[in-house]
Amino acid sequence: MPLNVGRKMHYMIVKDLSNVNNYGGNFDFGRSLNLLFSFLKMRAVIIIISDFIGLSENWYKYLRIASQKYEVIGIMVRDP
């Protein structure tokens, strides 16, 4: 998804968040944040929505790096 702002981006985010095919594990948190770091050059707010279950053991290292560079908001979702 290309980075952008506005109504179109809002709908793209909602569409991706509601797509059940995007869930189910096998998620590399560190890889995702590294990719995000390569795109973001200036200060930004990063919102992470996750259940934080099943992440690799060193995921907190990447979160610490992100929080030093950017404003980070983490939202834990627990839904059976």
Image (cartoon, helix red, strand yellow):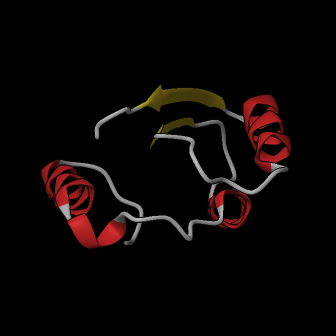
**In this image, 71 relative to 5: left or right?**
right
The quadrant in which the C terminus is found is top left
Determine the residue positioned at 37% across, 72% down: 1
Q: Position of residue 46 (x, y in %)?
A: 54, 38
Determine the residue positioned at 68% across, 33% down: 70
Q: Position of residue 29 (x, y in %)?
A: 65, 57
Please tell me whether residue 17 is drawn above or below residue 2 in the rendered image. Answer: above
Determine the residue positioned at 47% across, 40% down: 51
- Closer to the camera in the image, 31 or 35: 31
Corner quadrant of residue 53: top right
Corner quadrant of residue 60: top right
Please tell me whether residue 64 is drawn above or below residue 34 in the rendered image. Answer: above
Q: Position of residue 43 (x, y in %)?
A: 65, 36
Please tell me whether residue 28 is drawn above or below residue 37 in the rendered image. Answer: below
Please tell me whether residue 51 is drawn above or below residue 41 in the rendered image. Answer: above
- Closer to the camera in the image, 23 or 16: 23
Q: Position of residue 77 (x, y in %)?
A: 38, 33
- Closer to the camera in the image, 51 or 62: 51
Q: Looking at this rendering, what residue extends furthest in the front direction?
A: 80
**In this image, 20 relative to 23: left or right?**
left
Determine the residue positioned at 13% across, 49% down: 7
Count of marks, rendered view: 0
Corner quadrant of residue 56: bottom right
